Every structure is written in structure tokens, then in C-alpha cells.
Amino acid sequence: MSLFITFEGVEGCGKSVQAKALYRRLSQLAIPVVLTHEPGGTPLGMRIARWLKWTEGTDISPLTELLLFNASRAQSVTWIIQPNLENGKVVICDRYADSTTAYQGYGRGLDLEVVTAINNSATLGLKPDLTVLLDMPAEAGLARKGARKQDRFEQEDIAFHQRVREGYLKMATNDPQRWLVVDASQSKTKIAQIIWQRVSQLLSEWGLKRE
């Protein structure tokens, strides 16, 4: 049986760290698992990611962002996510369609029905079995980034990032069975334990090996 797990959250929340930690734990248990990320994950996706995050001197409209993210997503679903799920693997994805709803829908203000329709087309209707939201105030997440160079999204004002966070929390509230909301201010070890408790339960339900 396959299992599709996604990680979401504002900038600096630690989702990439936790996605990798879960990948390592599953690998150590000899459970077939694949780790991928958005935007990117495929050669085409990586090119799109560079355009979206690091383009300078060119304005990219919210609608263009929506379409580019979903172009990358469609490639990832077709070439990575769906084939591995069909082969009975656990697929972990660092960001997925909910990121687009949060950033381009709630953050940029695009019509949520339009965002949902385009997301559904790109994903072929494929939804995660579990979405982990590492929640923390937007200010705290950005502060974790430190002084390194910021991408286009990190450079947005704090109001944008607050809208993104609020969007995530609304989605989680509307679908509590799929979402696991974790306080991202806790230690990495504690967060990993909370995530593993839920994943372990799902593995048991799916008939997969666990400890």
C-alpha cells in the first residue's frame, strides 16, 4: 500500500528538516520511500523554480506564478509522485498544492476557486493522505532565515506572510482529518516525535511495517 505525505508551512518553519528526518526514519525501517520537493523535483521543475524564486528585474504576476507552480507540479505528479505511489512506495513531498493555495490564493489574493481548479488539473486530483503543517508566526519564521540572500517570496512584506499563515490554518481547520498541525517552535526532536506518532498510525492502518 502507498502513502502520500506532504509538508507545509511559512518560510523558516523547518518543514524541509522534518521531511528529511521522516525520510531517513522510513529508510532505516526498510520501507520504500521517495522524497521530493516543490517547486522542482524534476529537471523542468528546477528551471521553473529558479525563474519563480530568483528572477530579478522582471515582474511576475500572481496568475503567472499560479500557472508556473502548477506546470512544475504537473511534471512532478506525472514523473515522480504518481508512479511511485502506484509502485506501493511512501512519497514525501516538501510543499504541494496547498502551498499554492496559501501563497497565491490567500497571500496574493487570487480567486480561491480558480486556484483550486488549476491545482486540481495539475495534480490530476491526487491529494495527500497526510499534510503536516509546521505552524509558527510569520515573523519568527523569517527571523530564522538570518542574513542570507532572500528569494522573491522571502522579500515580501510581513502582511503577505501573515496572510499565508492564516490561509494554512484555515485549510487545516476545514480538513482536520488530513492535516496535522504542529507547533514549530518546539525542538526538532519533539516535532519529529509528534509527526512519527501520526505517520506510524497511518503505516499500521495501511498494513506497512513500523516500529
Image (cartoon, rainbow, N blue to C red):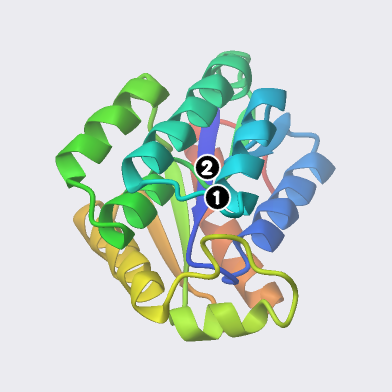
Element carrying mark 2:
strand
The one nearer the camera, 94 or 58, is: 58
Element carrying mark 1:
helix
Residue wearing tag 2: 5
Q: Amino acid at mark 2?
A: Ile
Which residue does the image show at 55% across and 50% down from the upper left? 199
Q: Position of residue 28 (x, y in %)?
A: 83, 44
Q: Label 2, label 1: how many angstroms apart (C-alpha)?
A: 9 Å
The one nearer the camera, 53 or 170, is: 53
Observer able to see residue 186: no
Q: Position of residue 54 (x, y in %)?
A: 64, 52
Quadrant of image for the N terminus = top right
The one nearer the camera, 55 or 191, is: 55
Which residue does the image show at 60% across and 58% down from the upper left? 196
The one nearer the camera, 152 or 184, is: 152
User: CB atoms at circles 2 and 1 under 8 Å apart?
Assistant: yes
Dot 1 surroundings within 10 Å: few (below 14), some, or many (20 or more)? many
Q: Amino acid at mark 1?
A: Val
Residue wearing tag 1: 199
Q: Is residue 103 above or below residue 165?
A: above
Who comes first in sequence, dot 2 or dot 1?
A: 2
Foreground: disc 2 or disc 1: 2
Which residue does the image show at 38% across and 55% down from the upper left? 103
User: In the shown orientation, is residue 18 left or right of residue 81?
Assistant: right
Q: Is residue 103 above or below residue 34?
A: below
Dot 2 surroundings within 10 Å: few (below 14), some, or many (20 or more)? many
Q: Is residue 143 above or below residue 57?
A: below
Q: Is residue 56 above or below residue 164?
A: above
